[in-house]
Each structure stands twice: as structure tokens, then as C-alpha cells.
Amino acid sequence: MKAIVWTKYGPPDVLELREVEKPTPKDNEVLIKIHATTVTAGDCELRSLKLPIYISLPLRIWLGFREPRSNTIPGTELAGKIEAVGKYIKKFKVGDQVFGSAGMGFGANAEYLCLPEEPGEMEGGVAIKPTNMTYEEAATVPFGGRDALHFLRKGNIQSGQKILINGAGGSIGTFAVQLAKYFGAEVTAVDSTAKLDMLTSIGADHVIDYTLEDFTKRGEIYDVIFDVVGKISFLRSNKALKQNGTYLLANPGSQVVQGLWTSLTSSKKVIMQTASGTIADLIFLKELIEAGKIKTVIDRRYPLEQTAEAHRYVETGQKQGNVVITVDHDDKT
């Protein structure tokens, strides 16, 4: 089968299209014929390992210090059709259309992937695809949708509350805007000029162009601030959070120390953690999608052989919503 192989840490050019052995499912696994996968900002960060040392060092110890020694096919999100099932599989059958995540095992940027029916904590998992989504649309949900859902639940979003989402125009942010609206919140979305119309179209009540205006100087106070990208000054943005409010950090960097100090010395709650989505979360999102409550935003589509080019585009920071990789098969089934 064809797959993108991650040869070493570095720029997008370290990704190569190769022929590799097609996997065979174990007794507790399904074999998925992948029709669509994605490239996220997280995929790019992992590929290059241009991360703070307290994050990059553990990853190098786990993945390989100088180069990846295993898990060398990147990609986590996928949508496709089940081609074969192990003998212990009960929930799925051949021909089922599914969507889900490979978790930290990666491997989704390929034509085929085996995943367990009952995944462990780091193994992702799949569910039946929303009936009103294409494979390309469904492939964007497992990461951005589940991460957004995870953090908003941690923030205990309530109807009538005011939430500000910084970095609202990306994979997580676009789902966070819609989910916050579903939970009844008043949503202010912050991102660059080109993304504001899109954010309004998916339900944001207010939009702020961070290139022209600093939201911390507006005098607005929010019940919840969800910083998706972790690139704003915590000391400044914290002033826009009400007492007893919640600050959600999906990608904490230099903000870790300040966040811990704020939690210890004030009534404000700062949540900094890695999201761990479940199959139940996938099913919850599937039901919302089928009910027309949320949708995905796709910016660009690339064929599998242009995955490195997709990485280059994602690294520009210009993408609106999601970047999808389409996986064509010779038999077209």
C-alpha cells in the first residue's frame, strides 16, 4: 500500500511517499480502507519537534532521540470503510463507513490502517460515520471536534455565559465556536482578518481581528477564555477573565508557570492538559452533526502524495478550519 513515511525530524521534506506492507488485522482489530485523513498544526509540530524542551525531550525519548524509530507513518484522523474484521469484533462489519482517530499510534496518512475495536487510552478509536458527511468532512472531526468538546466540558460552559475563543479559526477553534453556541454561550472569536467572515458564518456572536485590536484592552470581561493556540500574554489576557472564571489552555507554552500561579493565588481556575477523546465523544459529535447542529470547515484538500505540501501550508498559520488529505485507491471502491 501507499503511505507517507516520516524519516526524521525536520521540515516537510522529511515526509516521503513510499510503498509499505499492507497491515493485517489482529483478532480484536478492524482493517480500515482510508478515504480521507488530515494534516493539523499538531502533526506539523510533531514532525519538526520545534517545541519547548520540556515537551520535545519526552517525545524524543518515546519516539526516538535522533529520528523516529517506530510510528513512522504520521497522521491521526481518518475516515474510510471497513475492509476486514478480526474474529472477536462485535460492533462493526465489513462495509461499515467509519471515522475516528489512530491516537498516538499515528499511521492515518496511508491507504490502510488497523485499529482495535476497544482502544486503550492512547489508541484512538472509530465509530460509524455521520450519514450527512462525506469521508473528507468526517475525517476532520475526531481531533478538532473532540478536543473542543473536551475543553468546553472542562470549562463547564453554561447557557448565557460569555466565552472568548482565541485562535478560533483553526481545527479546534471552529468546532469550539459551534459547540459553545450549542451549549448556549455568547461567543467572541479572535483570529486574523481573513478568517472573520468564516467565524461569523459558523455562529460567532462577535469577532476580533487580533492583528488590529488587543481584546484585553476592550474592557470586556468573560466567564471563560479558551486559548487554543497559547500565543497571547497570560498576564494580559487573564485580566479579561472574571473572578471565579475559567481559563482553558489547549496548547500551554510559557503560560504554564503563570497559569499555575493564578490557580494557586486567585479564585480563577486555569485548566492546562492534553485532551483525551473517547468513542462516546465521537458518537456525541456524530449525533450533533446529523441533527445539523455543527458542521466542519475545510480550507484545502491535497492528494496523499502532496502531504508534505499540505504540511507547508498548515505551517503558514493561514488555514481556515481544516486541511484534508484525500486517499484515492486504484479500484475506486
Image (spheres, helix red, strand yellow):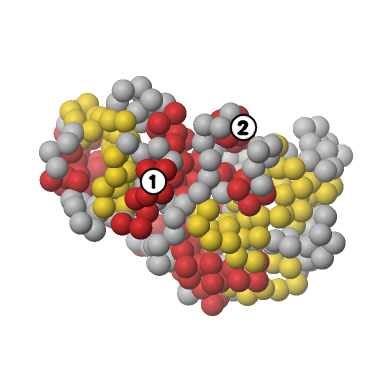
Q: Residue at x 69, y 66 (%)?
A: 3
Q: Tell me the quarter of the picture where residue 331 sits.
A: bottom right
Q: Quadrant of the N terminus?
A: bottom right
Residue 235 visible from this viewpoint: no
> In the image, residue 61 lies at what x, y percent?
49, 62
Horizontally, is 239 left or right of 127 in the view? left
Left or right, 269 with respect to 59, comes to left
Q: Is residue 225 left or right of residue 34?
A: left
How far is disc 1 from disc 2 in space, using C-alphas?
21 Å
10 Å crowding of disc 1: few (<14), some (14-19), many (20+): many
- What's under tag 1, amino acid-wise? Leu
Q: Position of residue 74 (x, y in %)?
A: 60, 62
Work out which residue is located at the far bottom of the displayed protein and give it.
Answer: 13
Residue 279 x %, y %: 62, 35
Q: Residues within 10 Å of mark 2 (few under 14, many from 20)?
A: some
Q: Identify which residue is drawn at 12% across, 38% down.
A: 219
Kind of residue at badge 2: Glu
**Which of 304/294 is in front?**
294
Residue at the location (60% across, 48% down)? 137
Q: Earlier in the sequence, mark 1 or mark 2?
A: 1
Query: Which mark, by number, is residue 236?
Result: none
Which SS class for mark 2?
helix
Residue 175 appearing in the image:
yes
User: Please, which residue is most extreme toward the top here?
Assistant: 159
Q: Which residue is mark 2?
A: 290
User: In this picture, is 165 found above or below 104?
Assistant: above
Above or below residue 117? Residue 101 is below
- Quadrant containing the C terminus in the rendered view: bottom right
The residue pinned by badge 1 equals 199
